[in-house]
C-alpha cells in the first residue's frame, strides 16, 4: 500500500475521523461551515476579479477594493481549509481514489498559484493602472483564470459526493 494511501486509511480509521463520519450532527455542521466559508472566500475573490474586469466598482481604485475584501478572503480561506481538512479526515480513505477529489486538489493548487503569479508580476505596478476602468489584459486574464479555477474547485467539491 502506498504511503499516502496508508496515511489516508489511518485518518479514516482514527477515532476522530470515525466520530465525525458517524455523528448525526458533526459532519453536516462541518459541511455547512465549509460551504459558508467557501461562499465568503469565492464572493470576495469574485468582487476583486470583477473589479479587474471592469464590471463592478469601476470608480474605486483596485488597491482600495483589495484592502477592503482581502481580510475577509483570508478568513474565508482559513475556515474553508480547516473545515475541508476535517471533512477529508472523516472520509480520507474514500477520497483517496475519488476522481472529483483529486480534480479539486489540482484546481486548488492552480487557484493558489494564480494570485502568487499575479502578485509577483502585474500587481507590482498596480498604481500605474488601478484607476483605469478596465485593467491591463494580463490582470484581466488573471481575473478570468481565478473565476474559472475557483468555480472548478466548487464544482469538483460538490461532485465528490457523487463518485
Image: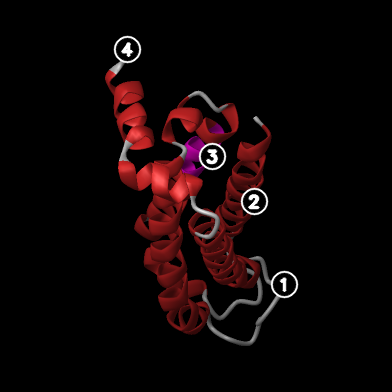
Q: Which residue is mark 1?
A: 55
Closest to the observer, 56 or 74: 74
The answer for how far apart the CA atoms under marks 3 and 4 are is 23 Å
Q: Nearer the viewer, residue 124 or 33?
A: 33
Among numbered discs 2 and 3, the one appearing first in the sequence: 3
- x and y percent of residue 43 in the render? 60, 69
Select label 3 or label 1 by which is in front: 3
| Residue 78 highlighted magenta (yes or no) | no
Q: Residues within 10 Å of mark 4 (few under 14, many from 20)?
A: few
In the image, residue 27 lies at what x, y percent?
Answer: 51, 54
Say which mark, if any, is on residue 161.
none
The majority secondary structure of the magenta stretch comes to: helix
Name the residue that disc number 3 marks.
104
- Which quadrant is home to the C terminus? top right
Q: Nearer the viewer, mark 1 or mark 2?
A: 2
| In the foreground, 127 or 71 | 71
Where disc 3 sits, the SS reads: helix
Image-based side of 84 in relation to 142, left or right: left
81 versus 44 height, above or below: above
Separation (CA) of disc 4 from disc 2: 33 Å
Amino acid at each position: 500500500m502506498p504511503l499516502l494511501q496508508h496515511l489516508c486509511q489511518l485518518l479514516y480509521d482514527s477515532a476522530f475521523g470515525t466520530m465525525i463520519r458517524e455523528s448525526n450532527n458533526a459532519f453536516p455542521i462541518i459541511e455547512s461551515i465549509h460551504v459558508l466559508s467557501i461562499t465568503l472566500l469565492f464572493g470576495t475573490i469574485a468582487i476583486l476579479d470583477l473589479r479587474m474586469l471592469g464590471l463592478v466598482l469601476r470608480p474605486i481604485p483596485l488597491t482600495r477594493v483589495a484592502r477592503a475584501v482581502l481580510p475577509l478572503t483570508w478568513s474565508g480561506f482559513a475556515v474553508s481549509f480547516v473545515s475541508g481538512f476535517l471533512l477529508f479526515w472523516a472520509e480520507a480513505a474514500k477520497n483517496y481514489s475519488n476522481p472529483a477529489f483529486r480534480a479539486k486538489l489540482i484546481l486548488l493548487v492552480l487557484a493558489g498559484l494564480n494570485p502568487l503569479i499575479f502578485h509577483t508580476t502585474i500587481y507590482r505596478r498596480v498604481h500605474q493602472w488601478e484607476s483605469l476602468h478596465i485593467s491591463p489584459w494580463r490582470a484581466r486574464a488573471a481575473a478570468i483564470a481565478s473565476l474559472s479555477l475557483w468555480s472548478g474547485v466548487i464544482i469538483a467539491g460538490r461532485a465528490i459526493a457523487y463518485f
